[in-house]
Image (cartoon, grey):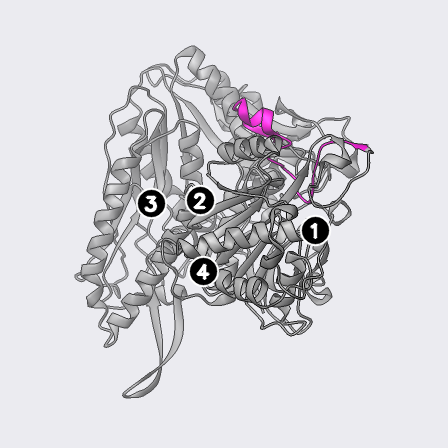
């Protein structure tokens, strides 16, 4: 499936319009300037006739098409990303061949008169819009008052920040279909013109009405914030607890809601700090701050508590919940002006930290009798978010990482050390054990294992024993042929979120982002399953890193009833496991390590180490049940180098049959892409060409964003 970046043609307009409408369906400015589809007053509180006019998607499409025609007639640089004509239709995962649009306007020096051809096209555009008003019986739900309010604030800002007499390349719209996000397509679309601007020595400028994740994306493209716009709709009303005080920090700006503001008045005013940035380049990005009526109760969490007065429902606000809600849902949408150049990230972090301290001082103004308990919950939620960042460390959020392998298999050690270095984590090696080197007296009396299985068991017991001896709270144990996806940190971050949701782990600390209310996390194996009576699971739909069912070398997995809700071939499930098999990679807590040692090194050993651990997870064969959780498909797989099958395993004899290199149950294998990663390439190749919307043959792993999951019960 080939995709090309091409100039817009007249034939592309319908598909380009559909791409923009789909991409901007949840855009804050879109919802602010248009009435919502139901015609309710969620966004528009005024009682004018216009406020009740519902959004008309067809009228909006006609308006976009008219502007595209205007751009074509004025020879503006408008580009689309589209599937080539040779791509089979059944291989295109969207309804149209256009999957990205980047709409620019060329520089217009303010001192020069507008060319007559552009002046004529301005009039033609006006007549087209007039025709559309007549055709559709109105402006399709456009709130004209808010539109012109925004245009006035926008022009004022342009007059202030557009200081280059040559004008600017202005990126009016950048849109990428959701099926293509994380593939680096947006970067390629923008760079068509931004690189041309660099060659010409011209500045570029763009606007956005969505803070997250757009801000980080534009920073990666070289843009940096330079100014903000504050737009106040005098008809809006704020519905907030009268004594609620909050310092809200979102990277580069601070919004203060002081006690003195009368939130019951018909005018809401939010102050916003303006940041001046000295830069060496002149490319700017404007970020727009809109003021909205909001009700913080929407972002509260309800808990039933017993107080001296009886049971009560406690509502509390988490710092990051409020930030996210105000920015993304209530359209307190910052529109940031950015300049390409050196990042000011350090200053932003300092501002965020200072404001966070202020939040702790101001929160007592909530008027809540039990505010201390509420603040504990806020701190806890904030701590959990910080804990997830600990997965970025050199032990993937665990306290230690072991790797088990025979000392003489230097080929496997070298490859795992290299793969771990590329992934940014370190391992401590635990030597594999030859059964002939063990004393028969060290074996349990009822041992029935084959010699190679005895050596495997002893090596894992040695790793667990070392963990207990060093009092590590958690440890990840890998086998020497373990492999993982290039996005393993993002996968583990969402896996941690799922495990914490399933275990209701309230005591998460920075050093334990996965929590500690478990014994085994079976992240790497060839099988796992949930008990038939299990009712809860965590689902990550449309996971691009999950291979389709036909390519999985696993069995077990989610219950059939779960697969009726989320398709098995596109979803990664996380659940409490009552079985597991193979030990490519698994994590244990100190409590879990002690329980395994007591059961398998002290009590009895009647099956291979992985099967015995599986019996403990399910409480089978007379074993005491322990707490096990697993993803399916697994996150850590196993790698088989190209060559004879007899080289693959040191436990079982293999045949002399030759096979290609393979990574079981992985899409974007680190080992299969090792040469590209060592060379510093931004893209990696999938092991399988699935042809599904949620996976891509070529992945820009540095731009990739792993999907969020949900707790289902």
Q: Give the class, few, some or many, for how many residues have Cα within 10 Å of label 4's Cα (few <14, many ≥20).
A: many
Q: Are dots 1 and 4 in contact, CB under 8 Å?
A: no
Name the residue beneath numbered marker 1.
451
- First along the sequence among labels 1 and 3: 3
- Label 1 – label 4 distance at C-alpha: 28 Å
Task: Specify whether 138 is left or right of 210.
Answer: right
Q: Nearer the viewer, mark 2 or mark 3?
A: 2
Q: Are dots 3 and 4 in contact, CB under 8 Å?
A: no
Report the disc number at residue 289.
3
Residue 472 seen by the camera: no
Over which residues does the magenta segment extend?
A: 658-684
Q: Nearer the viewer, mark 2 or mark 4?
A: 4
Q: Is residue 361 above or below residue 13?
A: below
Name the residue beneath numbered marker 2.
395
Name the residue beneath numbered marker 4.
590
Q: Is residue 595 above or below residue 352?
A: below
The secondary structure type at the circle numbered 2 is loop
Q: Nearer the viewer, residue 597 or 145?
A: 597
- First along the sequence among labels 3 and 4: 3
- Label 3 – label 4 distance at C-alpha: 49 Å
Say which residue appears at 60% left-offset and 34% top-offset. 408
The secondary structure type at the circle numbered 4 is helix
């Amino acid at each position: 499936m080939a995709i090309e970046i091409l100039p817009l043609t007249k034939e592309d307009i319908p598909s380009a319009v559909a791409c923009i409408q789909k991409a901007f369906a949840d855009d804050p400015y879109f919802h602010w300037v248009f009435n919502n589809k139901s015609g309710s007053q969620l966004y528009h509180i005024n009682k004018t006739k216009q406020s009740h006019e519902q959004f008309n998607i067809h009228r909006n499409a006609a308006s976009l098409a008219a502007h595209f025609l205007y751009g074509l007639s004025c020879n503006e640089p408008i580009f689309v990303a589209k599937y080539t004509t040779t791509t089979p239709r059944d291989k295109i995962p969207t309804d149209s061949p256009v999957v990205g649009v980047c709409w620019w306007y060329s520089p217009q020096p303010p001192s020069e008169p507008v060319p007559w051809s552009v002046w004529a096209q301005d009039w033609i555009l006006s007549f087209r819009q007039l025709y559309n008003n007549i055709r559709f019986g109105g402006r399709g739900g456009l709130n004209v008052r808010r539109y012109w309010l925004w245009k006035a604030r926008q022009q004022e800002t342009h007059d202030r920040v557009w200081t280059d007499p040559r004008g600017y390349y202005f990126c009016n719209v950048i849109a990428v279909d959701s099926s293509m996000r994380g593939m680096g397509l947006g970067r390629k679309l923008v760079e068509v013109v931004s690189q041309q601007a660099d060659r010409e020595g011209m500045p570029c400028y763009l606007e956005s009405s969505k803070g997250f994740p757009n801000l980080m994306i534009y920073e990666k493209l070289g843009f940096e914030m330079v100014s903000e716009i504050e737009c106040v709709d005098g008809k809006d009303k704020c519905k907030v607890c009268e004594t609620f005080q909050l310092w809200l920090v979102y990277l580069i700006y601070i919004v203060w809601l002081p006690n003195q503001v009368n939130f019951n008045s018909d005018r809401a005013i939010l102050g916003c700090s303006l940041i001046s940035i000295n830069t060496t380049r002149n490319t700017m990005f404007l970020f727009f701050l809109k003021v909205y009526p909001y009700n913080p109760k929407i972002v509260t969490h309800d808990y039933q508590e017993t107080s001296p007065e009886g049971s009560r429902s406690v509502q509390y606000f988490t710092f990051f919940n409020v930030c996210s809600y105000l920015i993304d849902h209530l359209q307190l949408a910052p529109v940031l002006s950015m300049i390409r150049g050196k990042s000011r990230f350090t200053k932003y972090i300092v501002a965020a930290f200072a404001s966070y301290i202020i939040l702790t001082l101001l929160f007592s103004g909530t008027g809540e009798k039990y505010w201390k308990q509420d603040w504990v919950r806020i701190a806890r939620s904030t701590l959990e978010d910080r804990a997830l960042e600990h997965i970025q460390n050199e032990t993937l959020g665990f306290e230690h990482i072991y790797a088990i392998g025979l000392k003489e298999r230097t080929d496997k050690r070298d490859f795992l050390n290299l793969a771990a270095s590329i992934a940014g984590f370190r391992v401590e090696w635990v030597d594999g054990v030859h059964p002939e080197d063990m004393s028969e007296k060290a074996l349990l009396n009822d041992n029935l294992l084959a010699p190679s299985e005895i050596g495997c068991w002893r090596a894992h017991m040695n790793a667990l024993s070392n963990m207990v001896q060093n009092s590590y709270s958690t440890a990840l144990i890998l086998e020497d042929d373990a492999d993982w996806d290039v996005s393993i940190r993002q996968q583990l971050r969402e896996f941690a979120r799922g495990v914490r949701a399933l275990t209701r782990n309230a005591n998460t600390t920075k050093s334990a982002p996965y929590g500690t209310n478990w014994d085994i996390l079976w992240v790497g194996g060839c099988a796992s399953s949930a008990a038939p009576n299990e009712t809860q699971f965590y689902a990550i739909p449309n996971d691009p890193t999950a291979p389709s069912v036909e390519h999985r070398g696993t069995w077990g997995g989610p219950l059939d009833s779960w697969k009726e809700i989320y398709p098995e071939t596109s979803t990664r499930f996380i659940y409490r496991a009552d079985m597991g098999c193979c030990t490519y990679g698994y994590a244990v807590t100190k409590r879990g390590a002690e329980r395994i040692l007591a059961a398998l090194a002290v009590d009895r050993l009647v099956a291979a180490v992985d099967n015995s651990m599986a019996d403990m997870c399910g409480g089978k064969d007379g074993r005491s049940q322990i707490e096990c959780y697993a993803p399916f498909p697994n996150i850590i797989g196993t790698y088989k180098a190209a060559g004879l099958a007899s080289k693959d395993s040191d436990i079982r004899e293999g045949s002399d049959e030759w096979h290609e290199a393979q990574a079981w149950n992985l899409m974007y294998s680190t080992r299969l892409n090792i040469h590209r990663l060592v060379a510093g390439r931004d893209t990696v190749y999938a092991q399988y060409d699935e042809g599904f919307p949620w996976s891509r043959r070529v992945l820009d792993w540095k731009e990739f964003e792993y999907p969020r999951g949900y707790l289902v019960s």
